[in-house]
Amino acid sequence: MLIYRDFTFDSAHILPGYSKEHPYGKIHGHSFRARVWIEGKPNKNNMLIDLGEVEQECLKIKSILDHNTLNDIKGLDNPTLESLSIFIFTKLIKTFPNLKTVEVHRDQSGEGCVYHGN
């Protein structure tokens, strides 16, 4: 069984390797939506996990990412959708060893990344 929790954040970034004339080489921002999937079996309360606990951990990550320049965050020197997915997964797997997948979406542009861990 899988359950998920979504959270959103708005951030700016520059993608290294692009010229300053290219749109990716200029500072720009996006609204992101992350979805974290946790796998397991329901416990005696018929719950896989308390989603309130998942929410609290997601809020910690949101506080790092939201309204910041992603390039300035340790581990996000090249803040692509792919690296954001890995960053979030790496943070959450410490608390939730049964974390299955992290998705990061830019809904306005119809783009996203799905990361299933190593």
Image (cartoon, helix red, strand yellow):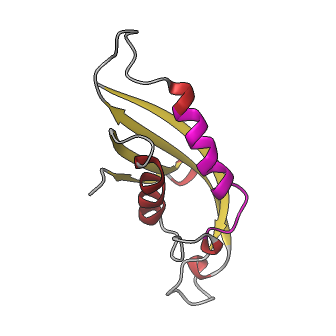
Instruction: Say above or below: 30 vs 58.
Output: below
Q: At 57% from the left edge and 26% from the top edge, which residue is drawn?
A: 52
Which residue, as the protein is rendered here, is positioned at the far top?
Answer: 45
Tally the numbered discs. Answer: 0
Stretch in magenta: 54-70
Q: Where in the figure is residue 26, as x and y percent of width and height?
A: 65, 80
Instruction: Say above or below: 76 vs 97.
Output: below
Q: Which quarter of the rendered picture does the C terminus lie within?
A: bottom left
- Residue 46 located within the stretch drawn in magenta: no
Q: Main secondary structure of the magenta part?
A: helix
Q: Of residues 108 and 29, which is closer to you in this image?
A: 29
User: Taking 113 as reference, is 12 left or right?
Assistant: right
Q: Where in the figure is residue 70, as x and y percent of width and height?
A: 62, 68
**Quadrant of the image occupied by residue 10:** bottom right
Q: Where in the figure is residue 36, as x and y percent of width and height?
A: 44, 40
Instruction: Say above or below: 76 vs 19.
Output: above
- Residue 62 located within the stretch drawn in magenta: yes
Q: At 40% from the left edge and 48% from the top edge, which residue is drawn?
A: 93
Q: At 28% from the left edge and 21% from the top edge, which residue is drawn?
A: 41
Q: Where in the figure is residue 7, as x and y percent of width and height?
A: 58, 40
Q: Of residues 111 and 70, which is closer to you in this image?
A: 70
Q: Which quarter of the rendered picture does the N terminus lie within?
A: top left
Q: At 73% from the left edge and 58% from the top edge, which residue is drawn?
A: 67
User: Taking 18 as reference, is 43 left or right?
Assistant: left
